[in-house]
Image (spheres, helix red, strand yellow):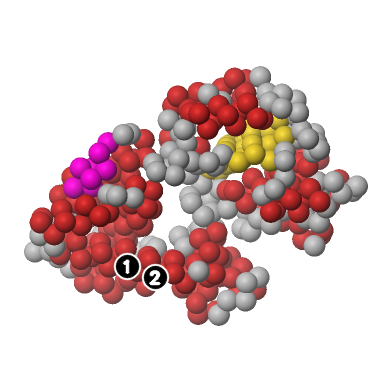
Amino acid sequence: MSEHWSHSWGVLGHDWAVNALRESLRNRRARHAYLIAGPDGVGKETLARGFAMALNCMHPDAALHPCGECSSCVRILSGNHPDILYSQTDATTGALKVEEVRGLSGRLSLKPYEGHSRIAIVRDFDRAAPIAQDALLKTLEEPPPYAVLLLVAEQLERVLPTIISRSQLIHLRPVDAGTIERVLTSVYGADPVHARLLAGLSGGRIGWAIRALADPDMLEGRTGALDQLEALIAAPRVGRFAAAEPLSKDKPALIAQLELWQTWWRDALLLTERADVPLANVDREQSLAEVTRYLSPEDVLKALQATRETIRLLNTTNANTRLALEVMLLDYPGLR
């Protein structure tokens, strides 16, 4: 296990990022703050955890850090290491609140209990309002010598330039479908046909594919969400407004559903423009082709832009969730 962890850090599909961080440790050039960005499920938090393990690994041979076997590595993997701090988003709004950021910054200033470094993994940093992001500036500008900040974010445009300029940016790109398929079959023993489907649906998000393999309900929930979208396109205004009420009750779940709908509209745009690009929702090709027979590229682009704008509003403002959703649905085309 030592050799496996020292080589990959448990990270799949992002060897370049692991190698860059490993080289910085070898040359004693590790930074005090990193910003790991990329789509949901692409492996950001896995990379952050692997780096934390490498920083605090207790194996006597530094070339084998992280070993994955020492007490420090095992506890970091289980989430129970006293020197590894994790942020928590608000359960109701999904936002990273300023009080949470300030508390995390205060705990980070304490000396390590037992490790070489005290490390904060700040999840969903792009869901923090500017005032909450500002709360980290003092720590970024005057970090304690033993402290390391690992900021994790999906959308870089939601992160303040002052934060980005003071952090080492690591931007994880989607993993190619062939690599995901090989990982699912060789590492997780997936059926080749099922692995190929999940790799295509993942959109390069290797973590999503692994979770979907372990949890069949994820695919069922996705199917229901896309069925609902196609039904709404065919529904009159009154039907769309009726659907907005229950959808708006759970904001984090709604944002996740809209992000899925965004991939459907992207596929629809590719079809209406006859673009020679693989679809993200490969299992919906038939229904997409049927619906887009009645839609123009302008119809689809307007719906895609409306979906993106609604996601942005819900993530970055206090806009009324139901009202924002109703406005979006009004911008969706109907079937002529």
Relative to 261, 194 lies left or right: right
Nearer to me, 295 or 328 = 328
Over which residues does the magenta segment extend?
Answer: 319-326
Q: Is residue 297 left or right of residue 44?
A: left
Type of amino acid under label 2: Glu
Residue found at x 37% / y 65%: 222
Q: Position of residue 297 (x, y in %)?
A: 20, 56
Instruction: Give the CA distance from mark 1 to mark 2.
Output: 6 Å
Q: How many marks?
A: 2
In x, y percent, where is residue 50?
Answer: 69, 49
Q: Residue at x 55, y 59 (%)?
A: 207
Taking the magenta stretch, the answer to whether it contains residue 314 is no
Dot 2 corresponds to which residue? 220
Name the residue beneath numbered marker 1: 224
> Measuring 63% from the left and 59% from the top, which residue is drawn there?
12
Compared with 30, 264 (above or below) is below
Quadrant in which the N terminus is drawn: bottom right
The kind of secondary structure the magenta stretch mainly shows is helix
Expressed as whole percent of the image width and height from the top left, the position of residue 104 reads 60, 32
Q: Amino acid at mark 1?
A: Gly
Q: Is residue 240 left or right of residue 129?
A: left
Q: Are marks 1 and 2 in contact (CB under 8 Å)?
A: yes
